[in-house]
Amino acid sequence: MERFTVERLRVVSFVEHVRRCPAKYFLVDRDSAGLPIEVLQAVAWDALHRRDGTHGQISVEIESDLSFTVESDQRPSADEQEELLPRFFGSLLDMFDMRRWAPSAAAALSVRTVIEVWLDGHGYRQELVGMDPTGPREEFIAPRLFGTRTTFHLDPSFCGQGEAIAWALRPKELHGETCKEHPSLTTFPIRDLRSETETPVSE
């Protein structure tokens, strides 16, 4: 009788899966020069689209070839507001459910992520390496009633030499079929600190 053996199954963490298969999250593989801009576009798309299908207000800053910040007026749902305590990953990124996977996937490709959440005038700030907090969250007076501001420093050893965030986003890439029901008339600024220029991007 022929025998078959089954290798021991191993659970792959979310971070490991993103780094193994970035194209499943960001459309391109690790060796693609377009990976940094695809990461930025995914995070911007997430920030722009609300759960009800409408569009929010966002802004984008590009600090360096592999670092960017996205600010959004997204407000956590009532359930998420009650869950400001650490959950699955033990970080403020837990406030984004798995339908909003982009910030977590971007953090998985980053050597450092700084996230701020503003809720009813209270601010919460935390730094991460990958998905792991480097320390407890800090509280401060929020600059706005609600919103989020997240800065990602992409891993240069993962992205590869010579890869960089393109200067401009492609607005058509930030919308899908569901956006036809809730067309956006919003423009949002993209500030490129590498050249100290700012340009509005129309939807």
Image: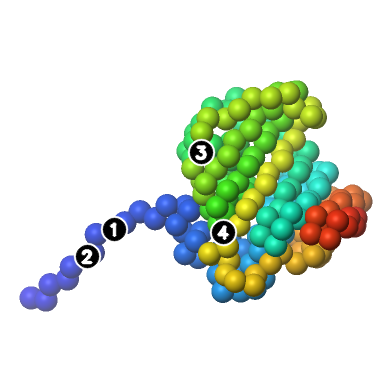
Of the two numbered discs 3 and 1 in the rendering, the one whose residue sits closer to the viewer: 3
Q: What label does residue 9 carry, if any?
A: 1
Which residue is tagged 2?
Answer: 6
Whichever of callouts 3 and 2 sits on the residue coming sooner in the sequence is 2
Contact (CB < 8 A) between labels 3 and 4? no
Helix, strand or loop at mark 4: loop
Q: Report, in whole angstroms, how far the alpha carbon at label 3 lies from the one at label 4.
A: 16 Å
Residue 126 at x, y percent in the picture: 59, 35
Judging by the rendered image, the residue that carries numbered circle 3 is 134
Which numbered disc, 3 or 4, marks the residue that appears first in the sequence?
A: 3
Residue that extends furthest to the front in the rendered view of this protein: 195
Of 188 and 157, the residue lying toward us: 157
Considering only vertical position in the picture, is 121 above or below 26?
Answer: above
Contact (Cβ within 8 Å) of mark 3 with mark 2: no
What scheme was used to colour the molecule? rainbow
The amino acid type found where label 3 is placed reads Thr
Return the disc, 3 or 1, that comes first in the chain's sequence.
1
Q: CA distance from mark 3 to mark 2?
A: 38 Å
Question: Mark 3: which secondary structure?
Answer: loop
Judged from the image, the secondary structure of the residue bearing numbered disc 1 is loop
Disc nearer the start of the sequence (2/4): 2
Q: Which residue matches tag 4?
A: 155
Q: Is residue 165 something one can see in this rendering? A: yes
Residue type pointed to by label 2? Val
